[in-house]
Image: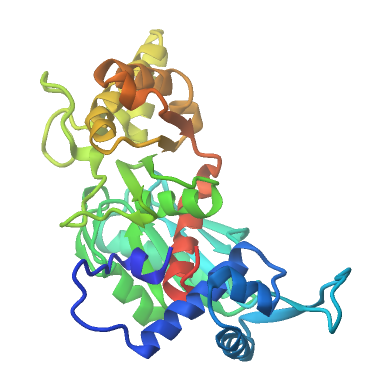
Amino acid sequence: MTRESFAGIRQLRPSRKLLPEHARGHNRSLVLQTLYRASGKSRADLARDTGLTRVTISDLIAELMLEGLVIELGQREGEARPGKPATLLDLKRDAFQIVGIDLSAFEIFRGALLSVDGEVLHSAEIPLAGSTGADATAKVFALAEELVAAATSPVLGIGVGSPGVVALDGTVLGAPNLGWRHEPLQTALSAHFDLPAVVANDANAAVLAEHSFGGSEGDLMLVKVGHGVGAGLLLGGSLLHGSRFAAGELGHVVVGTHGGPLCVCGKHGCLETWLATPRLDAALAEARSSGTPTEPILTEAGRHLGIALAPVIAALNLPEIVLSGPRELLDGALTDAAVDTLRNRTMAEIHGELSVRMTTLGEDIVVRGAAAMVLSKQLGVS
């Protein structure tokens, strides 16, 4: 994924030629991406893999080594060819660290300091305690402050996954659960810390994590269940943002025609009222206290999820749905009910090869996705 694809900047009818400085930036990202995914490449290997000339590769590697982004590992051993053995290259993987922050949970804001490979080096969290508006913003800054202070290498940037609708410039246009409207979070973080910052919807961050670190390779929809409910869509290797940056906002889609609980957005029967973590936890706690079975609650939540997903699956013919959220809530009866509902509401040709599974990235999925956003913006790698 290139910087252009992450930012959503894609001209269908280009109106001007590609300038030399743009071409160099593209080639630079291409080299970094190749090394990011497969270390131990020689300059000749890079020329073959990227299609760039050896002269171009040599110039780029010299530049990247001067910046401390690429290092030489030593000579390749066991080569049968005559002449000097090739010198192998890699990213300098300890050159930077990344701050990733997840604002999607119900009770806490979670953050981490990560390596460029998405490894969590240090974790921190701060209780949300019902904070909204300016108080919630202050807690984001406090968490970022702690993580930046913990860094042992230069910080490449700060990535944030936020609930709600987030514009491409990192402004949170609306996050009802946090009381935010037109919150310029990305601009404020960058100015305060004098570091690059990227703020995106938490489900979009999560789907990027699944792409970069979770092994998914094709088109993908990730449904993120936490304080609210949202989805990230990766199609053709690019995030789908939508014309108003609200693609994947399934949480505030009314499912069914029989009313339902009141949602924070003011409507009745939104998917979020059945599926969001605080709603499910409260319903399950009430059932346990009254001695009634809990499985029907999970089954009903899964059924409503299936109702919401069926038209999306049919429209896009997606091969994979990944669920992210509390495993004890989502895995089992809820997922089974969602799959059954999908099958009952779509043609076999649509759902026959569909995979529905839990993410393997656990609770770190959004902070790792936040790191992926920073890597994409700053180095053009994913």
x, y (%) of residue 377? 41, 72
Image side of residue 42 versus residue 81, left or right: left
Q: Identify the residue at the far top of this view.
A: 292
> How many marks can you see?
0
Q: Residue at image x 72%, y 69%?
A: 40
Q: Identify the residue at the far front of this view.
A: 82
Quarter the N terminus occupies: bottom left
**Quadrant of the image occupied by residue 248:** top left
Residue nearer the viewer, 68 or 97: 68
Image side of residue 157 versus residue 342, left or right: right
Asked if 287 appears above or below 54 in the picture, the reply is above
x, y (%) of residue 271? 24, 31
What scheme was used to colour the molecule? rainbow
Residue nearer the viewer, 15 or 362: 15
Image side of residue 337 versus residue 97, left or right: left
Q: Is residue 286 visible?
A: no
Q: Residue at image x 47%, y 74%?
A: 157
Q: Is residue 244 visible?
A: yes
Q: Residue at image x 27%, y 64%?
A: 134
x, y (%) of residue 352? 39, 23
**Quadrant of the image occupied by residue 24:** bottom left
x, y (%) of residue 371? 49, 63
Asked if 143 appears above or below 235 in the picture, the reply is below
Q: Residue at image x 30%, y 27%?
A: 305
Residue nearer the viewer, 21 or 119: 21
Residue nearer the viewer, 35 or 52: 52
Asked if 132 appears above or below 377 in the picture, the reply is above
Asked if 59 appears above or below 46 in the picture, the reply is below
